[in-house]
Image (cartoon, coloured by chain):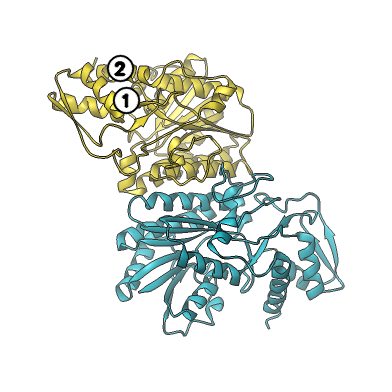
Chain colours: A yellow, B cyan
Amino acid sequence: MTIFITGVAGFIGSNLARRMLERGSRVAGFDNLSLGSNANLRPILGHTAFAFAVVDLADLAAYRSALQTLHARSPIREVWHLAASSDIPAGVADPRVDLRDTFMTTFNTLVLMKELGVRTIVFASSSAIYGDLGDRELREDAGPLFPISNYGAMKLASEAAISAALESHLERAYLYRFPNVVGVPATHGVILDFVRKLKATPASLEVLGDGSQQKGYLHAEELIDAMLFARDRAGDRLNCFNIGAEDDGVNVRFIAETVVKRVSPQARISYGQGNKGWVGDVPRFRYSVAKLAALGWRPSLGSEATVRKAVDQIAQQEAGG
Amino acid sequence: MTIFITGVAGFIGSNLARRMLERGSRVAGFDNLSLGSNANLRPILGHTAFAFAVVDLADLAAYRSALQTLHARSPIREVWHLAASSDIPAGVADPRVDLRDTFMTTFNTLVLMKELGVRTIVFASSSAIYGDLGDRELREDAGPLFPISNYGAMKLASEAAISAALESHLERAYLYRFPNVVGVPATHGVILDFVRKLKATPASLEVLGDGSQQKGYLHAEELIDAMLFARDRAGDRLNCFNIGAEDDGVNVRFIAETVVKRVSPQARISYGQGNKGWVGDVPRFRYSVAKLAALGWRPSLGSEATVRKAVDQIAQQEAGG
């Protein structure tokens, strides 16, 4: 029996596949390589229990054909659906990006799970579904849900489609609402942006916004710990968990300073105006991870240590080291 | 300046268009006539301030071309987006029905509003977005939102896409979460089902479920009153309102008895098992309409009187009278 991962060549998918292989699972994955890459899979591509194919999950016919072949060879036990466009600003500029890569990949995955009789899905949702609820604590049962980015909207749409599918053909679903996740292989995000900017212009770092924007950060390794932990222990029909840091997070200023110190200590940092980096980015954030803690999982690193570790890893990655 | 209505040939769309014309507005509407019909538009088709075209809103190219033509002739001031598949069981059987007719019609409407610079949308959402929250009171800020039908899922997805669009190109949105609406021209729903069953077999009426399922009902005329009232008075960027009855509703038994009395008084009613009529149908329902009442609007008829009025109208409709 195989665990099937969509978006397997992405930042989180590739780490997840490696971890599952280490646990002794048979793993297969598809990716369209729009944001993921073969390089991310290098550590596991030769593994005998791992199968990979380049498939565009938004193309139902291609997806069906590839998944049928895979399922015939090694029956799929459950689907971990991570494929999505993780480029939030791209989705703000053109909603069709998230429609296609974030929502239709989910919709098609559900269509094919129904056809193949695969009944468990684990879904990488997002804290972006909450939109901007001001200073309210964001528990899993918070409402109303008015996302402010198309990325968040299409993640919420995906949750809704999965929830409805539980009434017909699915037996169990895990909706994990991801926080800001950092680590390697980094494909996007503020740390990578800063590292690359400094490599291009080592004397200065220009930051969008005033640097006061504060968020909690979780390392990808810990995110995967949490996902596997909850998958093993939570047995409701629909299991929805926020996953994230327990502290109030760090601000962009801290991240900028940490990157500068590691990559280009002489650089001058200049800040913009306001506390929104781009349209669709939520400034404040009180993310409750109490439900997951009650189940027994807590992160071992705080946001500061997480960012420091990731900055170090991403600086190494970008140095080609 | 024109008010543009999608799904204008449907049950609610055709009533809304007529009312807006009575208020002196210029009205244009599209419909794919999958559930709507030309017959519904008969009372207004000759009106000089009304324009109608058969357009499939899920086909972006066709929709764009038709809307550009309309907008060039008479600029669109705001969009009332009512087009959707209202056939919940069809969407449970095949999720592609609601994907196409309930969600993609919304997505395409937003794409074209951006292209044409139309900045106000009024959207016919649904109480189905709440899923089954048990005995909890369903206020507009209730969570979590886990719909149990694809219809509800694609209405929630539509709300989410509209919410995200407010961060880029929309100025104002009205999300009206519709209750069970009855009236004429009836195109679907339990009353029409019962009337038609009795016309086919006048001696007996077979009811799905045990008849205990209870819901509030609102008449279409009152729904339209409420929509126009809130559109005129609520001025937030995002205005979300439950619209519905204020009472606890009536059960299916009451509806069956009312229909039998009106259509075929000799008929024997037989009931099934359980209180779910079909997959995706929510049995209990505590729908809060306090927010709309605070704005100043309340229904004038209770659920019982609403059902009696609708049964009478639908019986007449089906008698061809």
The structure residue drawn at horizontal position 69% and vertical position 45%, both measured from the top left corner, is: B135
Position of B241 compared to B218: left or right?
Answer: left
Q: Position of residue B216 (x, y in %)?
A: 68, 60
Res B213 → quadrant: bottom right
Determine if residue B224 is in view: yes
* Front position in the image: A156 or B217: B217
Q: Position of residue A180 (x, y in %)?
A: 39, 29
Q: Earlier in the sequence, mark 1 or mark 2?
A: 1
User: Mark 2: few, some, or many residues within 10 Å (few <14, many ≥20)?
Assistant: some
Q: Position of residue B94 (x, y in %)?
A: 58, 51
Q: Which mark is residue A186?
A: 1
Q: Quadrant of the C terminus of chain A?
A: top left
Label 2, secondary structure: give it. helix
Q: Which mark is residue A313?
A: 2
The amino acid marked with disc number 1 is: Ala
Q: Position of residue B91 (x, y in %)?
A: 58, 53
The amino acid marked with disc number 2 is: Gln
* Front position in the image: A45 or A98: A98
Determine if residue A1 is in view: no
Position of A184 compared to A145: left or right?
Answer: left
* Front position in the image: A159 or B69: A159
